[in-house]
Amino acid sequence: MTTATRKFERPLRLAVLCPHFEPDTAPTGAVMTRIVRELVAAGHEVHVITALPWYRNHAIEPGWGGRWIRRETTSWGSITRVHPFPGNDKANLLRRALGFVGFSALAGWCGIRGGRVDGVLSMSPPLTNGLIGWTIKVVRRAPLVFNIQDVFPDAAIETGAITNPRLISFAFWLERVSYRRADAVTVLSTDLGENVDAKIRPRDGAKNASRPAERVRVIPNFVLTDEIRPLDRLTRYREELGIGDEPVVLYAGNVGFSQSLELMLHAARALPHATFVINGDGVAKASLTSAAAGLANVRFGGYQPMDRLAEVLATGDIHVVALKAGLGRVSVPSKTYSILAAGRPVVAAIDPGTEVPRILAGSGAGIAVAPDEPAAFIDAVAALLADPARREAMGHAGRAWVEHAASPASVAIAYEALFRELAAARTGRRGNGRRRQ
């Protein structure tokens, strides 16, 4: 859709349901915040339903407590924040599930208020946002676009986080129902799209022939190329971690059981001349810290404010993206785009033939190896440590690729076009219905 075309179309009125929004620090919050900003810049009215800020410490941020629901009117719409019912034990899946249910109930109550809209955009995880988005869709009479950041419950099953057969069956049922209630499901890659499409199609026959030709759409995440830029490697963050000018291999992101970060420790033992930094928090951090005891070239850092993201990324000479085997087809680590924007090369240990290896091959920005194979990972890291010129060339290539392929404006335009397509389809169905009467 061109700018000239967009100028003559009526602005949209949209409802957005998401688990995080600025000033919350979650990566998905940064994604949705920027999409909303771009939609607002295009002249649309947006009403956001989200959680009170809580991601950093898994607790409501200071200054935001005291009320379960807070509503703010903005110049472009509104932001309604509800209690997320966080628990302090991220490994307790039952407690987390109950928190999601509580958040979803409050968010649903707030989301059905406010009159008719032209579209509803709902983000998962949590998966419960699918049915809440559908409720908002029905009450406010608008098409629903369900945005999937990670395919659940596949990832949880692959990592062993969910083993109860009844719980697994319920999660798959909820997933299928949520996808089928949406007018469109957006995913980050063709791998995720094939996964979702396979779950929709078995019972999605002729009765759905009137829907748009393809319910599952690929709209990738973007990177803030104006905010994340290549910086000097000798950052203040190095000083805070007690690191000199030696090469740094950096992992920055969620420290969970799906990330295969044991590879970092294997490489640290084999390559003592480099420093390995694991920056972030999560359920696996305590066990990794214990396993790293005695490794003088390993550092751990906690989450940093969003305004330090470019500095944190610049600290690494080589960045790591790692997922356990089987997870590359159900998750696309959004950190990959940010690393490329920072002008740093990537070593990815992830399923071959999936989105991240394709990005690295297409951009020339890094090396992909099979997951959970320490020897291959060590060889790839060692090759880049030994060749600074190759690292620099890969960094330049990655930066050029994201500037061309992953801008926020292009993603927002894709969502706008999708909502207009769905609205036109609904209008056509209503018109056909009236003619048949």
Image: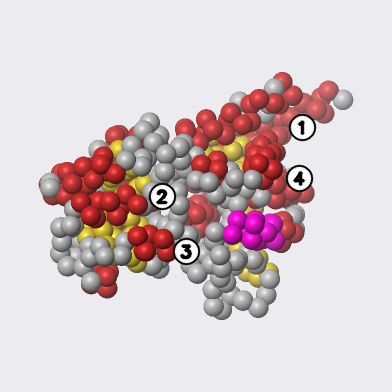
* Distance (Cα) linking label 3 and label 4: 31 Å
Q: Mark 4 — residue?
A: 138
Q: Residues within 10 Å of mark 2 (few under 14, many from 20)?
A: many
Determine whether the residue tagged by mark 3 lies in a helix, strand or loop: loop
Residue type at mark 4 is Val
Q: Is mark 4 on a helix, strand or loop?
A: helix
Q: Disc 2 designates what residue?
A: 259
Tell me which residue sits at (46%, 60%) in the image. Answer: 282
Secondary structure at badge 1 equals helix
Q: Residue 192: x, y in percent?
A: 50, 36
Q: Is residue 195 rendered to the left or right of residue 235?
A: right
Q: Quadrant of residue 398?
A: top left
Q: Is residue 93 magenta?
A: yes
* Residue type beneath disc 1: Arg
Q: What stretch of residues is rendered in magenta? A: 92-104
Q: Where is residue 158 in the image (x, y as percent from the top left)?
A: 51, 42
Residue 423 at x, y = what percent? 66, 38
Q: Which of marks 4 and 1 is nearer the N terminus?
A: 4
| In the rendered image, the vertical position of residue 383 relative to residue 52, given as above or below | above
| Sooner in the amino-acid sequence: mark 4 or mark 2 | 4
Measure the alpha-carbon separation of dots 4 and 2: 38 Å
Q: Main secondary structure of the magenta part?
A: helix
Q: Residues within 10 Å of mark 1 (few under 14, many from 20)?
A: few
Name the mark nearer the viewer: 3 or 4.
3
What is the CA distance from the residue labelled 4 to the residue labelled 1?
15 Å
